[in-house]
Image (cartoon, coloured by chain):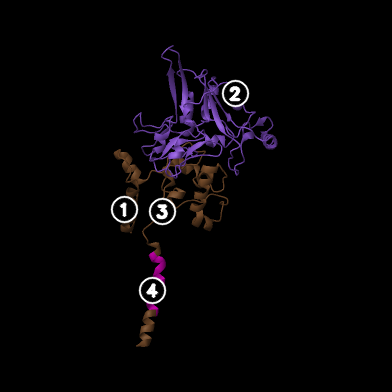
């Protein structure tokens, strides 16, 4: 969050262009396409003025609910390996249950790629396949990935998976194949289209609202306001990675 | 005698030029058949034939690393336009626009081990199952030799076509 302070002028420009966009998206009388107003134009590259992040409120995360995991599977199609053992199959997001041994208090939370500001996966990648986009989303470029799995070793969150077998039924927006490492993309295809992540959407749909997605650099966004107001935690803050995914209530 | 040689060489040239088209038509590799979609491609056909791989590679990096998602040189849009919905649903693989031509030209690069081969709107996203993959899948084997298998199958196919003629 090094770029938290944005010049007011640029912001105003951005907001007015957003308003114009929103105005142009009335498809028919009474039919307005919401959410696209924030989308960047398709021909513009992503910039570091934005830092996408998620805030997970573990007090709202229901024990036993895995709607976020199911939504991720459906959205990205990563649950279609037939030969892999349970320990080998892809896991872009998982539910983790934490239990305080002293008190017996138990709660659960989703764990996925934390989209670090200083990603160790990108540090160790010998080919440059692991990289951080300007807007803070950490991705694997499978065109360059040689499947060495150094990134899986380097990731303190165990957020990455390796595809061990020939895959069929890929989705057009999410090409996947044998011999590559993969992980949460923070629904980059949706984010670029101005939408929220699939897990956040599913959580809201289930009525829990435990996952808040937004721009950490935009002081007026809900996520920036919340992290400014309430104490939130980085998992393994001691590593100094500054993850884009933060937790509250742990 | 000189005249005789001249005449003979002329006759030889004539025979060779006459038989050239016949020879070309008998190469043993069937021409790919695919219907072209209506409307205009994003570039001229000749330009696309020669340069589509460059466009795709450039666009792939722009999209992956910089988040530029224009449609002009996007592989997804190629598929959306060039793979008809009916063909996608029928699961016809051999007439696939990209794969049939790659097979004809002996190009082994395979975008479709990872990328979907069906248009976005179709409910079916099965990638092309190459003969090598099929063999490996049926045997539940690792498919590290898949490329080799596919090449062998392509050779076999062309041989059998040649033999049947």
- Which chain does the residue under circle 4 lie in? B
- Calculate the distance from the C-alpha at mark 1 to the C-alpha at mark 4: 31 Å
Mark before the other along the chain sequence, 1 or 3? 3
- x, y (%) of residue A91? 42, 30
Q: Are marks 1 and 3 in contact (CB under 8 Å)?
A: no
Residue tagged 4: B15
Q: Mark 3 or mark 4, which is nearer the start of the sequence?
A: 4
Provide the residue span drawn in magenta.
B10-23
Q: Secondary structure at mark 1?
A: helix
Residues packed near mark 4 inside 10 Å, few (<14), some (14 to 19) or many (20 plus): few
Residue that mark 1 sits on: B156
Q: Is residue A3 magenta?
A: no
Tag in front: 3 or 2? 2
Give me the C-alpha separation between circle 4 and circle 3. Answer: 33 Å
What residue is pinned by disc 2? A226
- Mark 4, mark 3: which one is toward the viewer? 3
Q: Nearer the viewer, residue A172 or A163?
A: A163
């Amino acid at each position: 969050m090094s770029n938290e302070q944005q010049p007011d002028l640029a912001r105003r420009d951005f907001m007015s262009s957003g308003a114009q966009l929103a105005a142009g998206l009335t498809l028919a009388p009474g039919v307005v396409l919401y959410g696209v107003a924030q989308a960047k134009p398709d021909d513009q590259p992503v910039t570091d003025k934005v830092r996408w992040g998620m805030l997970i409120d573990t007090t709202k995360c229901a024990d036993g609910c895995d709607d976020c995991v199911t939504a991720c599977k459906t959205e990205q199609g990563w649950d279609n390996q037939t030969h892999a053992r349970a320990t080998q199959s892809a896991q872009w997001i998982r539910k983790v249950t934490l239990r305080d041994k002293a008190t017996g208090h138990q709660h659960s939370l989703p764990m996925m790629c934390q989209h670090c500001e200083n990603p160790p996966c990108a540090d160790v990648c010998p080919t440059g396949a692991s990289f951080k986009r300007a807007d803070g989303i950490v991705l694997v470029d499978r065109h360059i990935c040689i499947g060495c799995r150094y990134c899986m070793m380097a990731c303190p969150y165990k957020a990455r998976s390796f595809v061990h077998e020939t895959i069929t039924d890929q989705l057009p927006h999410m090409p996947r194949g044998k011999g590559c490492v993969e992980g949460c993309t923070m629904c980059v295809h949706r984010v670029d289209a101005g939408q929220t992540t699939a897990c956040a959407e599913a959580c809201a749909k289930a009525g829990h609202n435990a996952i808040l997605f937004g721009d950490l650099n935009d002081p007026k966004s809900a996520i920036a306001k919340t992290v400014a107001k309430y104490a939130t935690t980085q998992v393994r803050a001691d590593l100094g990675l500054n993850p884009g995914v933060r937790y509250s209530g742990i | 005698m000189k005249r005789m040689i001249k005449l003979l060489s002329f006759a030889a040239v004539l025979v060779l030029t006459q038989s050239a088209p016949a020879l070309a038509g008998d190469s043993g590799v069937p021409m790919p058949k695919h219907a072209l979609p209506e409307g205009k491609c994003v570039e001229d056909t000749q330009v696309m034939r020669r340069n589509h791989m460059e466009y795709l590679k450039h666009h792939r990096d722009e999209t992956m690393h910089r988040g530029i998602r224009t449609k002009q040189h996007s592989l997804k849009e190629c598929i959306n336009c060039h793979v008809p919905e009916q063909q996608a649903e029928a699961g016809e693989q051999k007439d696939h626009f990209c794969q049939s031509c790659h097979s004809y030209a002996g190009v082994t690069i395979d975008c479709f081990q990872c990328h979907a081969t069906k248009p976005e709107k179709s409910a079916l996203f099965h990638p092309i199952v190459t003969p090598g993959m099929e063999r490996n899948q049926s045997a539940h084997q690792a498919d590290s030799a898949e490329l080799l298998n596919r090449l062998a199958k392509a050779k076999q196919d062309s041989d059998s076509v040649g033999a049947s003629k």
